[in-house]
Image (spheres, rainbow, N blue to C red):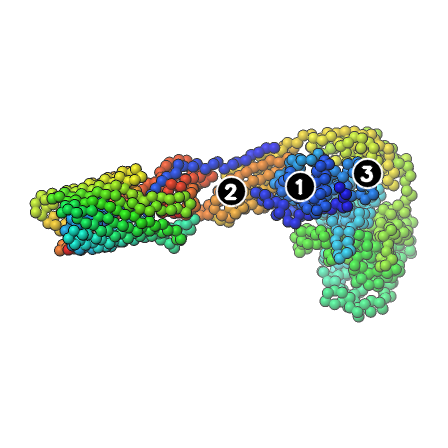
Amino acid sequence: MKVKSLIALLVCTAVVACAKVEFREVPVPETAAGGQTNESDLIKSAIIKVDDSLVEILEGATEENKIYTKSQSFNDAIDDLCIVSYERLYPYAGEFEPRTREDGLHRWYIVRYDSSRALVKAGDALSAVDGVEKICKPRKIKRLGLPNDPYFHWQWDLYNDRSINMTIKEGKTVYSSNEGASINVADVWDFYTTGSSDVIVSVVDGGVDLSHPDIAANCIPAGKNGSYDFVNNTTRITGDAHGTHVAGIIAAIRNNGVGVAGIAGGDYAAGIPGVKILSCQVFIGEDEVAEGSGFMRAIKWGADHGAVICQNSWGHSYEYDEHGDITSKGLQDAQNDSIEDYEKEGIDYFIARAGCDNYGNQLPDSPMKGGVVIFAAGNDAIPYGVPADYEPVIAVGASGPDWKPTWYTNYGNWVDIAAPGGDLYGRGFGNETDEVGNSRGNIFNLYQSTYDANEAYQSYGYMGGTSMACPHVSGVAALLVSYFGGPEFTNTELKHLLLDGANKAYETSKTHIGPALDALGSFNLGVPPSTIAPDKVSNFSLTPVRKKVTLKWTVPTDADDTKAVGIRVLIGQNADRVASSTPSSLASGVSMLDFRTGTASVGAELTATIDDLAYSTTYYVSIFAYDRSRNYSVSSGVKSVTTPDNKAPEVVKQPDNIILYGIGTGVNIPFSSIFRDPEGDPMEYYVGSSNTSIAGVIVQGTSIRVRATKGGVAEVRITASDGDKTGICSVPVLVKEDPDDHAETYPSPVTKELTIRTEEPAETHVRIVNSTGRVVYEETRTFSGFDPLTIDTAGLAPGRYYVTITYNGKTYKKTVVKV
Amino acid sequence: MILAACLIPAAALAQGPVSEALPFTQLDYNPASIGMGGTRVSSSATLPLSGVKLGGGVSYQNYMPQLSATKYIGGGFASSLDKLGYSLSFVHGTGEKLYIDDVATDYNPTEMMVNAGVSYAILDQLAVGVNVKYAQEQPAKNYSNSAIAADVFVAGKFSGLDFAAGVSSVGQKVKSQATGEYSLPSALIASAGYAYELTEDNVISARARVDSYFSGALAAGAGVEYCWSGMVCARAGYHYGGDSIIPTYASAGLGLRYSGFTLDAAYLFASDVLGGSFAISAGVRF
């Protein structure tokens, strides 16, 4: 069969694929607050290897653009697992297709399924398919040494591994985030510095929230010689979102396990403070326009109070229409606009005087002689910008997650450098949004502590604009001063490192916004590259812990760099393939992970964890040490490790049968009260009801809430999964529409079977008489709400019947009509 | 995998009861009979031998009030000319409001029966009669059952002794919506009574009746009546229901007669089902 192309096949609707669903289930990740999950959490995948016969079937279905195949067992898996798509793991390879098939790579498929609707475990469903030879879980690549700030994974501007989907299609144009479209600062943190409290950055902006817990320690307190409000001429700073966001990009406390990481925010875990923020408030609250008189005073204030970097995310204001777009008059004004002399002299003052005494000599405690003034280019999408176009300042344009200029950035040859500004207002890169609809293509950082409009993050949120791009440059400048600063280090050298170290590969001529800010490039410009690879890791150990392996190794030496700065770990299930892989060339089935040395010295023993492994599986591991220039050592040899067997989650306490008195009533059952995982693995929970019209199930936090919707009996099922095995608990639910009706008879009219339901089990006397009083049925027996009495009424002639039910000393009378 | 399923046990399925359709066709609506344990036969066969040329009346019965009362009202007339007798009567019952699916409805179930009879005295002391009746019930809104049935009796009277025997409620079957057809409560019935004059103004009567149902059930009743001066009668009776459609009960009754007008009443007791039921009637006969 000739295969032209293989594409993912999407099911028209999940309902079609899941027509056999009996239990409507809702996944509840244990760690998710409120039990909420986004769509990407629900679509999971598995990788399978299939035999040639199934390959032919799958390729046939793919060619016909169908998801259902001629394999009944595979179709069953589609229904049971709610498979939404499948495609070749190694796509059609054109001229290389013959050798791709020769090596059997065409037999690998990736199957995506809706975990929220799946009735069975993926492993169970796929292993039952005829022709499936192997089932694997997709591996993730992870790096150690990145900060532990919980929102760091949203800061693509600092570290972009494409984990955030920011691809959109507009017409025929596809915009996509490129791996590495960030300021490339992660290696700087490991190899050079995370910032120094000797460096002060004055933030001329709205007030910085000096009490924000994720930046407070890196801020200079308000005072007559500290942060200052130039609007009201007071020492009371009023933090606003813009000013706090800008300051957070520069100096939010890094690696503190809280919120976000600032570029020069230090290393909280290592006890290293970040650079200092001097808040010079020039805006009132969230006002976007302010009188300019205070601005120059604020700039000068920084120079006079220790700042050597002056951060300015503001510019001249023109005329705008109701949509915020610049008018033709505004454009004309912008074209004719130029920096005022008082502005020039204020900026010149900072550049010349920052870090110096009155005689122009560098102050002994200043890290730099002279200052650098950095300005945002502006957001009007025009080739003008004042005062950013003043030649002595560094003008910053805004790039997006695709390295390209954003649609809004001002541009021109006067723009010196580009930095991530985010996609303003989410007009692009909106494919993935947060819980409140913000485009993750914007820049995520601090809001003031009192900001309550965004309940999802409280004192954090998204912003976009050259206002956000500018502090990225200020932050990297602060890192450079932190590392290279000291006696004789000048502002000229800093500009050289910043601008000449920038990444020119993505510079565009059409709308010039300069080369891309490249933190590592700037540092490497100042430090000669390493040429000698480090020694190999002489010894390492692997210890299995559940689905993880603990790796211990000793930091090796490096002839020209003192020590190795990290190791690359190659891991796979095939010893030969791991042995034949190199750090830059991985054999099939081999994954890699990087772990950084950080501040550890040569000879220090480090520990890291390789997670996301499978139970009861043997892995082979090879290690290569590397230096800051990515010179790799030889391999440390291949070692094996076998992960232990896994036990399924256990039901530790079977919940009592549930009786709900009245429609709308409900009960909560904490998952943790039912299940325990023997290995202590985190569990995901799935809940369902055999009849949602009787007992609905919803999720409230880490509990299941069972809610009465109609009288009757249903069964609620709770499934706990540790990712490998599952435990199931079912709980009968009795819903009584009338709370005061302690003996229900139904249906009425009855045709064949009459059911009599009480509550708790009790010996009960039942008598049925016809309309003339004849006793047609009389019996005493024990039954209950969950074990009701059912009477075959086929022998009863149509008519009225009277039922008396006596239990627990009380008698209840009912009328039943047989038809 | 640990499976801790708490499956709902299979419901206990009781052996199915049986019953007959339109049971009210066998009810006794005559208080003079009810007071004596329901021992009289309601058949036109007795007309030619009764000496009544023309009679009529109305009745009311509150039946089975302890469970769910059905209130019957009825009326009719009868006449005999020489050897020929004929009668026409009706009864209509209204039950208490129903609950369908535990929801109270505005609907009261109803029962209705129309009865037409004709009889002929083949001898001076022996007559035969045929009754044809149409019975219908509507136990719930939009549900109704009906049937046409007949009674055939032979009645005789010799001095103070009278008797009647025949078959009752033989007719159509009633069809269920889902579970087939059901017979009416047909039965072979025999009844006999004897009146003894203690004095001219003091008469004692005794009466007995046996019902052998086609379903196999057997019922029997016995009662006595004391009448003073042909004006005031006191009655007592007992009915053994067995598995028949009318349960066991005891009864007492009272009757007044004056110048062709009658007023009768009966009360049922000694039955946890029928206890408290009562019936009254007023009539005239010439």
Asked if residue A263 can be seen in this view, the reply is: no
Number of callouts in the render? Answer: 3
Name which residue type carries label 2.
Ala
Instruction: Indicate the position of residue B34 as horizontal and vertical percent values.
Output: 22, 46
Chain to which mark 3 belongs? A
Residue A70 circle label: 1
For the point 91% across and 43% down, the residue is A528
Residue with the most extreme left position? B199
The answer to whether residue A317 is left or right of residue B70 is right
User: Could you classify mark 1 by the number of other residues whose Cα lies within 10 Å: few (under 14), some (14-19), or many (20 or more)?
Assistant: few
How packed mark 2 is, by other alpha carbons closer than 10 Å (few <14, some 14-19, many 20 or more), is many
Q: CA distance from mark 1 to mark 2?
A: 36 Å
Percent of width and height locating residue A637: 82, 30
**Which badge, 1 or 2, comes first in the chain's sequence?**
1
Q: Earlier in the sequence, mark 3 or mark 2?
A: 3
Residue beneath disc 3 = A99
Type of the residue with mark 1: Lys
Measured as percent of width and height from the top left, residue B242 is found at 28, 38
* Quadrant in which the N terminus of chain A is drawn: top right
Q: Which residue is mark 2?
A: A714
Q: Tell whether A439 sits left or right of B66.
A: right
